[in-house]
Amino acid sequence: MQIASWNVNSLRVRLPQVLNWLQENPVDVLALQETKAQDPEFPLDDILDAGYRVVFSGQKTYNGVAILAKQKPEDIVTDIPQLDDPQRRILAATVSGVRVINLYVVNGSEVGSEKYTYKLDWLDKVTAFVKDEASRHPQLVVLGDFNIAPDERDVHDPARWNEDTILCSTAERTALKKLCALGLKDTFRQFEQEAASFSWWDYRSGGFPRNQGLRIDLILASEQLSAVCNCSRIDKTPRGWERPSDHAPVIAEFKLG
DNA sequence: ATGGTAGTCTAACTA
């Protein structure tokens, strides 16, 4: 079973790229973030025509998440306890017995800002939710745009991206560790990877051609799934396409019984 | 330190 995640930064703009990518990479599950599409505007027919079922939780202008799957997504969750939040950042579904939790983690803007506080609180509530989900779903994947680079290997310039910088701060990394302490593994690090492997490059100042990026898009897997994970990688190809998203898709493969 | 680009929507916010 192949499971992928991609922050598309507007599904309306990136739909042709998503469909092209799926033709080349016919994954079983594709989790999308930043669809920026309200539910009535979601390109449902195009995705059904591509042979995928889909569930989505969208809003106007910002955020928005979706799960495309070859098999029917079931037991959909878009809202979690103790988080009364209009921002559409969470989408959980069960596909072929695998629980998939798609997250578009809050960016946080700047360390110490109001949005940063919201990010840490959001992560706290989401971790409680994932703990509950993990207790009922031994086959669990938590994936998406985490807006956190797990450690120094995941940033192009650790001096520039340090413990006081958004996406890298100690509190953010500690929150990610707390989530992983529920028994989730960063599948990317289960395998040997090229140095300077990133999943996001700023549109500004030629980030991609200089490979000045961060690895903030993650596929975390429960013990049962990480034990059967064959491969976890980043596909940089679409980042080189014309009018790309600033994120590349990430893919993990699991050998299921 | 700042500014650089992109998307949504046409001013300003978010990333």
Image: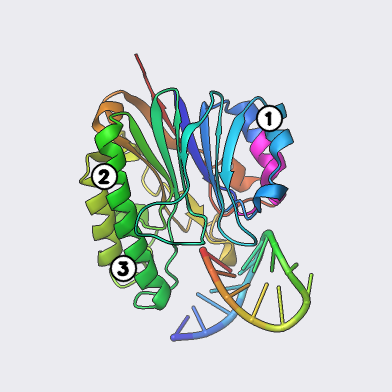
Tell which of A210 and A70 is nearer to you.
Answer: A70
In the image, taking residue A50 as reference, residue A133 lies left or right, namely: left
Residue A198 lies, in percent from the top left, at: 44, 49
- Amino acid, disc 1: Leu
Magenta segment: does it hold A13? yes
Q: Position of residue A102 (x, y in %)?
A: 45, 44
Identify which residue, A107 or A154, lies in the foreground: A107
Which residue shows up at 39% across the image and 33% down it?
A: A99
The three-letter amino acid code for the residue at tag 2 is: Lys
Q: Position of residue A62 (x, y in %)?
A: 59, 61
Q: Is residue A111 left or right of residue A86?
A: left
Q: Which class describes the residues within 10 Å of circle 3: few (<14), some (14-19), or many (20+)?
A: some
| Badge 1: chain ID | A
Task: Find residue A162 and name its label.
Answer: 3
Residue A242 in view in this figure: no
Q: Earlier in the sequence, mark 1 or mark 3?
A: 1
Mark sitting on residue A48: 1
| Distance CA(mark 1)–CA(mark 3) | 43 Å
Q: Quadrant of residue A137?
A: top left
Q: Is residue A30 above or below residue A173?
A: above
Vertical arrangement, residue A67 with respect to residue A245, above or below: above
Classify mark 3: helix, strand or loop: loop
Chain of the residue under the numbered disc 2 shown in the image = A
- Mark 2 element type: helix
The residue that appears at 28% across and 54% down in the rendered structure is A176
Name, please, the residue furthest toward the top. Answer: A257
Residue at 65% across, 27% down = A23
Chain where mark 3 sits: A
| Residue that carries the numbered disc 2 in the rendered image | A131
